[in-house]
Amino acid sequence: MKVFTLLASLLVADVAVVAAQGTIVPHKPSGDLNGSNFTYPFPLHLYKFTSQQQQLEMAFMDVAPTSAPNNKTAILFHGNFFCGATWNQTIHVLAGIGYRVIVPDHIGYCKSTKPVGYQFSVAQLATNANTLLQTLGIGNVTVVGHSFGGMLTFRYGLMFPNSVDEMVVINAIAMEDYTAKGVPYLTIDANYASSLQSTFASIQSYENTTYYVGQWEDAYDVWVQMVIDVFYGSKRDAFNFNQAQIIDVVLTQPIAHEFANVIPPVLLMIGEKDTTAIGKAWSPPSVAATLGNFTALALDVSAQLPNCTLFTFPDLGHAPHISDPARFSAALVEWLLTGAINANDV
Ligand SMILES: *[C@@H]1O[C@H](CO)[C@@H](O)[C@H](O)[C@H]1NC(C)=O
Ligand SMILES: *[C@@H]1O[C@H](CO)[C@@H](O)[C@H](O)[C@H]1NC(C)=O
Ligand SMILES: *[C@@H]1O[C@H](CO)[C@@H](O)[C@H](O)[C@H]1NC(C)=O
Ligand SMILES: *[C@@H]1O[C@H](CO)[C@@H](O)[C@H](O)[C@H]1NC(C)=O
Ligand SMILES: *[C@@H]1O[C@H](CO)[C@@H](O)[C@H](O)[C@H]1NC(C)=O
Ligand SMILES: *[C@@H]1O[C@H](CO)[C@@H](O)[C@H](O)[C@H]1NC(C)=O
Ligand SMILES: *[C@@H]1O[C@H](CO)[C@@H](O)[C@H](O)[C@H]1NC(C)=O
Ligand SMILES: CC(=O)N[C@H]1CO[C@H](CO)[C@@H](O)[C@@H]1O
């Protein structure tokens, strides 16, 4: 075990030297960038780097603290159908308590490259974020991730435990092994064909049920429009194919068997009314019925994680940071400042 750890860290160090040769350039926050024309709330930068023999660009925001610096950095991983921009309120909260906040769009999403022929993996996306941080000269980070970004946060913590101060995971997908529980494999081609059918109404309806427990507010429209403009934007084909590749990643690269190995402290924040489960839609009813019970998953996963604080929102769905930012922020800040959450405070 010790030898393996040493080897692993040598390999990681090796990779970092090569990949940290990427460059950072500024970019104006509006206009079409790799298929997204959404205007971001903070200035954008492009991390240009080589991965899998391709020149890639990862767009990210880099926000300075707005109060006395705590000399810590947070990196925020968005989920599917969301972009870095969706973290706006959380960015304000974290910068407000002294964090520098780095907010990338993952490769394949939003304002980052939609590569053709790229082998997507959770480990590759985690590595891309790690080399971005190295190129910026940032050491330890607090990693915050939602949904697919939560799955990515777990992988990041497993791969880079020595540079993670703590992790905050919000309604992560893949807290159960979908394939092991009986979700049939659907090919990338089939998922691509299905992704191309996405409309404003289909995404709104899906999010209404799973993200917001049927309580839609006009303020959520902007996030649907943001992603539907990518679905129909200048990188339409590549984006839809990348979306299909991501589903393949989620189904074939489970994290659910590794929670006991997560070393950094974790704040697990769970909207219990969430029912998200990748593949539930094409699973037999007997399988579908066993998937996406976030009350059960929260208890199960928090018991496996060596150092976990579980905070639940009994009345909320998949996106508590969007549906109740005040309650979400109060809990988040209290945990980051004290390592615990007193239910009476939030
Ligand atoms: C952050 O770093 C600055 C400069 O080194 C130092 O003056 C300050 O005390 C540090 N703040 C904290 C909270 O550690
Ligand atoms: C971002 O969040 C801040 C603080 O909540 C808010 O004042 C601002 O209007 C938001 N900006 C955008 C572009 O949504
Ligand atoms: C970075 O994080 C590791 C692992 O949590 C910790 O041991 C180390 O002290 C941290 N380094 C700094 C400079 O805070
Ligand atoms: C959201 O779901 C609720 C409950 O099913 C429904 O009444 C409402 O019309 C839906 N809103 C939208 C925008 O789809
Ligand atoms: C953004 O892109 C979408 C899809 O191409 C387009 O319909 C929309 O008009 C664009 N919006 C702006 C402000 O350019
Ligand atoms: C979800 O899990 C909880 C906790 O195990 C259980 O009490 C509840 O009945 C389950 N709900 C469904 C719909 O299966
Ligand atoms: C668990 O994490 C907290 C920070 O949230 C830390 O203070 C504590 O020492 C950790 N406990 C163990 C056993 O590592
Ligand atoms: C792969 C790709 O399309 N990259 C583009 C991303 O956006 C930048 C800035 O407009 C272009 O220079 C890249 O070609």
Image (spheres, grey):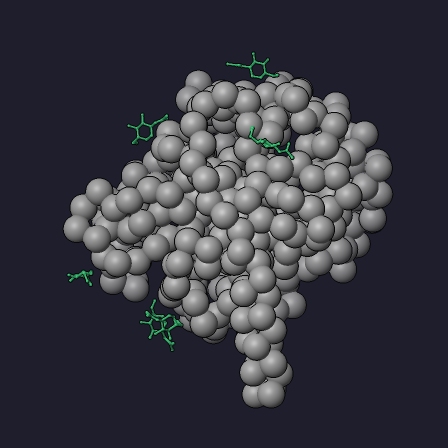
Determine if residue 200 is in view: yes
Q: Along the line of sight, which residue is nearer the eye, 223 or 292?
A: 223
Q: Seen in the image, is 325 located left or right of residue 298?
A: left
- Residue 56, given in percent of the width and then of the height, sits at 62, 43
Count all numbered tags in the image, as a single digit. 0
Image point 58% across, 70% down: which residue?
14
Q: Along the line of sight, which residue is nearer the eye, 219 or 158?
A: 158
- Residue 252, given in percent of the width and then of the height, sits at 75, 55
- Residue 263, given in percent of the width and then of the height, sits at 47, 72
Q: Along the line of sight, which residue is nearer the eye, 127 or 157?
A: 127
Determine if residue 313 is in view: no
Image point 61% across, 26% down: which residue?
35
Image point 58% across, 49% down: which residue?
49
Quadrant location, the N terminus: bottom right
Q: Quadrant of residue 11?
A: bottom right
Q: Quadrant of residue 256?
A: bottom right
Q: Seen in the image, is 211 located left or right of residue 266?
A: right
Query: Which quadrant of the frame does ligand 3 lie within?
Result: bottom left
Image point 40% across, 58% down: which residue?
137
- Residue 154, given in percent of the width and then of the height, sits at 54, 60
